[in-house]
Amino acid sequence: MPTLEAVQLPPAAPAAPAGTGHPRARASALAALITVVAVCAADAVARSFPFGRHTRSVNDLGNQFVPFHAHLWDLLHGRAHGGALVNWQSGYGTSLLPDIGTYLGSPFALLVGVFPRDRIDLAVYVITVLKMAVAAVAMTVLLLTLRPGAGRRWVAGVLGAAYALCGWSVIEATYNTMWLDGLIAFPMLCLVGEWARTRARPLVGPVVVALAWTANFYTAYMATIGAALVLLLRLFLEETEVRARVWALARAAWTSALGIGLSAPILFTVFLGTKHAYPGWSKEFTPVPWSDFLARWLPATYSFSSPALFLGTGALLLAGALAFNRAVPGRERYAWTGLALLVALSFQWKPTHLAWHAFQTPNGSPYRQTFVLSGLLVIAAWVCVADGLPDRRALLGGGGVLAVIAGGAAFSELVSPWSYPMFFGGLAAALGALLVAGRARGRRAVALTAVLLLAGAQTAQAAVTAAYGDRERLHRLDSYPAWGGAHDAREAAVAGADGWPAYRTDPGRRQLTGNDPLLVGGEGASYYSSLTPDVLTKTMTALGGGWTSRGRSVQSLDNPVTDAVFAVGARVRAEKGGRPEVTRSPVPPLVTVRGGGRSPQYGGSPFRNQELLLGARVYTLPRTVAEGCAAGQEAFLWAPEYTGWARLGTTGKWVEFRGGAPKRRAALAPLGVSTGPSSGVVLRPAYKKAQLGCLDRGALTAAVERLRTTGASEVHVSDSGVRAVLPAGAAGTAVFAMPRIAGWRCAVDGGPSKPAGSYLGLVAVELPGSGSPTAVSCDFRPPGLKAGSAAGSAGLVGLVGTGALLAVRKRRAGAPKRA
């Protein structure tokens, strides 16, 4: 197979000098040790899990990542409802493969399987610390590959730790676990670029690229941009011939293409999953004030909307000193300094900001590429010190750079009382370490003192910054408890009521997280993901459902009509601090039959929309909420934009509503059984746009019985589909109790498979109306899987072909010449 390497076969990579293995290993071990000690010490000081009573599960960590890792545990142990293609537990059935690619693609995620399930929070914490340690090792290896730095490899270890402990890592990525794969990816992709430049490891490179893009494509994209910039700079510095530069770039491009191709089955499904997701939040980029930009270089600062640029004063001193270090060739020191400066400036300009983020301002923190700049600064610091300690002139220049940062930051409100003491204390320690190192002259004790000074300063600054971040996140963000008694009780209640697939068990409207079905079990409406399907959010909204996170965190809807429609036969209810209780109701099977004819359309009232989907009139709608319902009817209040409290009459229980577009939408909620027209609804504060629905339970029971009689007599559910047998003579439309997300294809009586129809947002199939029992089956394949698999196969063929060509060329090169 023709490849870019077929024209110019790379010679074998030169062997590493004897005796370099152990020093490199020691430097890597030092980097990992500093990282682990700093992170664990910070959490211990902050009394954060697992070292104290404060939860670390803030924001999406507790709401998304821990539950998704719990679901991965279930998949690994055969306990999950569904497989890699369909997640039957969330959102009444949704696609899992895009979520795997977004949240669980990292090889480190598999480590959850070795922990007990009720220690899932500890498993995620260990994975987080391990990823940071591996990032420190990867950066250390990269630094020593760029420059061996004989006699100063310990500095490479400290700088590797500085990269892993950068502000972006300990402030932002520590609770966005999958971002840490990008922290590892940047130095690894830089190594791939080095291999392309030196014609080494042509088969390992694509595998590394594939792992990076599969682990987390989002940060891998940013890391790839950073690695490409490093490669271009290296070619500018190290290669003098245009031909050599062109072939190095060609080899790098081929390696990247193969690696990204290998990851295509995941990448394509994630990409198309985002196209079918609810749009969420769009935000216009606005650069932060320069005072705030500079303040984030200091220790112990926190902000969600500015780049977390803290790196450690020692690393910053060396990076700033590079431009003034005459021991380094001018072309090299100005190139690395200029690259770092240009990347820093690119953060504040909208076109380059968009380029870093795949041309879309992210939902949330707008400076997610910050780790790339941290890596570039660490490389610059290493270039400054690798071939010799910087002299007084260079250190004065570096000190001047730090003075500008410290002076500019003084105008920012982000500076904390800890920032300047830790900053100048770290500076003093770094200067002391360099002074001591200059006098070591082979004496181990003196060299060890220098190591302790520099490593100690880095550890202390990073630990204080991380601890400060732990505290600030708890004050500013939503938090979720680590697994405890409430989780045990909810999990036991769900497991005891489980009847899937005969009926669903909803873990409850009162949520522990936005992904309770993944965390404690069951099969409910709750689902929170960046890939929450548009059809799910819109369907549940039409039925009176509530949500947060601008529509991407769909909540459970505690309503007997929607429970009947979605075959929720058991529902867990738990008051705050109380034991969960299970209520059961007879419900239709997962597949029911509706009459044929024109497909209905949702209107403006969730009560009427529920009746459309049910196929029967079951609600009475009073003109005002003050009129109340007839005695014996169940009262339900719909006030999606209301924030306040409501109750039925003067003795009913107060029910909270938390509306407020565009961030939140309050769910339609039960208020209790009415005692008559005098028991109207009381709202505090007053609100005029609420609507009251009065449910006739007898009418609902009759409607459910009709659906049970005409519905499927058999239902079989697999990891990727549903098969149902309907009664003889079934005619009209078979409706499956799952949202009609893209990827469903259905067939009748073994006939040809066609894209599923939609009945008010649910999967539907038109029936022929034959006299014999009818078998209907629907299978799911996520959009992009077929094309992604083809691209992945092409990447694999390209990799195998490249390996075969190299083997043939190597054999020919070693064959004896003919006379």
Image (cartoon, rainbow, N blue to C red):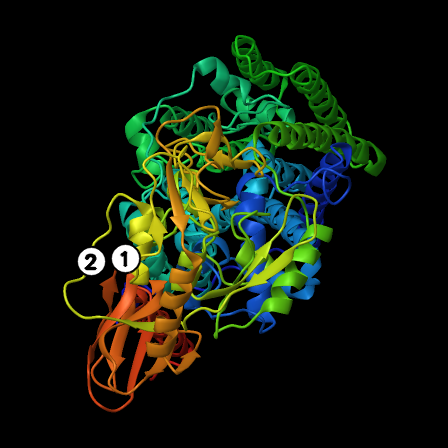
Asked whether, in this view, residue 479 is left or right of residue 536, the answer is right
Residue type, mark 1 in image: Leu
Residue type, mark 2 in image: Pro
- The percent coordinates of residue 306 (x first, y second) are 47, 25
Q: Secondary structure at mark 1?
A: helix
Mark 2 in CB contact with mark 1 (< 8 angstroms)? yes
Q: Is residue 540 above or below residue 396?
A: below
- The percent coordinates of residue 724 (x first, y second) are 36, 81
Image label count: 2
Q: Secondary structure at mark 2?
A: loop
Asked whether, in this view, residue 359 is left or right of residue 128, the answer is left
Q: Is residue 704 above or below residue 209?
A: below
Residue labelled with disc 2: 600
Mark 1 Cα shell of 10 Å, populated few (<14), some (14-19), many (≥20): some
Residue at the image position 72 percent from the left and 18 percent from the top: 425
Mark 2 or mark 1, which has the lower sequence index? Answer: 2
Residue at the image position 47 percent from the left and 29 percent from the top: 683
Residue labelled with disc 1: 612
Foreground pick, 37 / 540: 540
Quarter holding the N terminus?
A: bottom left
Quarter holding the C terminus?
A: bottom left
